[in-house]
Image (tube, helix red, strand yellow):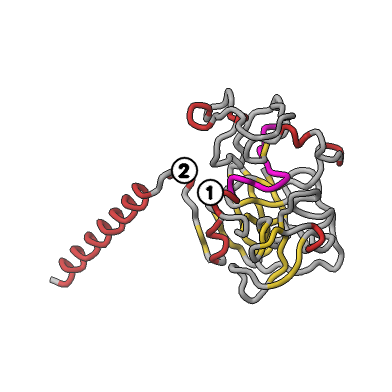
């Protein structure tokens, strides 16, 4: 009798588990973009554009495709064009579309979970310097060959992003789709050193470069870090997201 009851119990458990998996998949709007969270701080759950977020020791690993969740003229002639293409609707009268198209990548960002100020600061390089909430990389304040963004900015789409020659879409400045939907005071992502990036408004006041240190940040409590933390702010003028150096020791990325 005990064996029979055990068999009935195990059968029921298997059925319940299977049902739970089915419900989970049915409620997932995009099963291919299911977020996996393994022992990571709650704040990283805000990176809704990640395909997975995991932790190993003192590092959190964030995987994304880099595809923006908003429309763009740079989806033209891509496999996402039917649903994601949108002609330029911004206000820059000098806007000119660059010849590149958005491409999907397999980004892996590895950031320190408990970031600390680096004794020796290191410079940002070309390519991703961090990751935004929708999985799109942040780039620094330079175009190729450390050139200013003076000309390149005219190719930013209506959400302030554009793809590089390889098709890697990114933001050099305020990701306006995120600030429109999350708020201008909101957490917008993280740089590779693990420190958070916030929007261009704080306590109801627009942040300017003069409010920040040379790394483009400052330290105090935020909604996500009530005990206080160093954090970067996006501003409307160069260097936009970050100074020339990381405040902390940067992790790594691959694509």
The foreground one among 24 and 143 is: 143
What residue did someone put label 2 on?
A: 32
Residue 216 at x, y percent in the picture: 78, 59
Exactly how many numbered labels are in the figure?
Answer: 2
Tag 2–tag 1 contact (CB < 8 Å) = yes
| N-term-proximal mark, 2 vs 1 | 2
Mark 2 to mark 1: distance in Å?
8 Å
What residue did someone put label 1 on?
A: 51
Q: Residue furthest left?
A: 1
Camera sees residue 163: no
Quarter holding the C terminus? top right
Q: Secondary structure at mark 1?
A: loop
Looking at the image, which residue is at 69% across and 36% down? 156
The foreground one among 197 and 5 is: 197
Residue 207 at x, y percent in the picture: 73, 59
Q: Is residue 99 left or right of residue 214?
A: left
- Check disc 2: other Cα within 10 Å, few if <14, some if 14-19, many if 20+: few
Looking at the image, which residue is at 44% across and 43% down? 30
Residue 162 at x, y percent in the picture: 68, 36
246 within the magenta span: no
Q: Which residues are magenta?
A: 166-178
Quarter holding the N terminus? bottom left
């Amino acid at each position: 009798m005990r064996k029979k009851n055990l068999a009935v119990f195990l059968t029921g458990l298997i059925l319940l588990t299977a049902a739970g998996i089915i419900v989970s998949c049915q409620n997932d709007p995009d099963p291919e973009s299911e977020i996996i969270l393994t022992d990571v701080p709650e704040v990283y759950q805000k990176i809704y554009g990640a395909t997975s977020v995991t932790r190993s020791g003192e590092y959190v690993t964030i995987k994304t495709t880099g595809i923006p969740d908003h429309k763009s003229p740079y989806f033209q002639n891509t496999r996402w064009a039917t649903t994601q293409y949108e002609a330029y609707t911004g206000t820059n009268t000098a806007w000119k579309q660059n010849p590149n198209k958005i491409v999907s990548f397999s980004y892996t960002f590895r950031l320190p979970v408990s970031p600390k100020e680096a004794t020796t600061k290191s410079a940002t390089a070309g390519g991703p310097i961090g990751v935004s909430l929708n999985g799109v990389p942040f780039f620094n304040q330079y175009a190729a060959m450390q050139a200013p963004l003076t000309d390149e900015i005219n190719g930013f789409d209506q959400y302030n992003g554009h793809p590089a020659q390889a098709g890697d879409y990114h933001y050099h400045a305020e990701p306006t789709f995120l600030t429109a939907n999350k708020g201008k005071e909101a957490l917008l992502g993280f740089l590779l050193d693990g420190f958070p990036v916030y929007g261009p408004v704080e306590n109801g006041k627009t942040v300017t470069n003069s409010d920040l240190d040379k790394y483009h940040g400052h330290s105090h409590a935020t909604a996500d870090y009530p005990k206080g933390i160093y954090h970067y702010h996006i501003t409307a003028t160069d260097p936009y997201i970050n100074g020339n150096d990381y405040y902390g020791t940067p992790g790594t990325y691959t694509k």
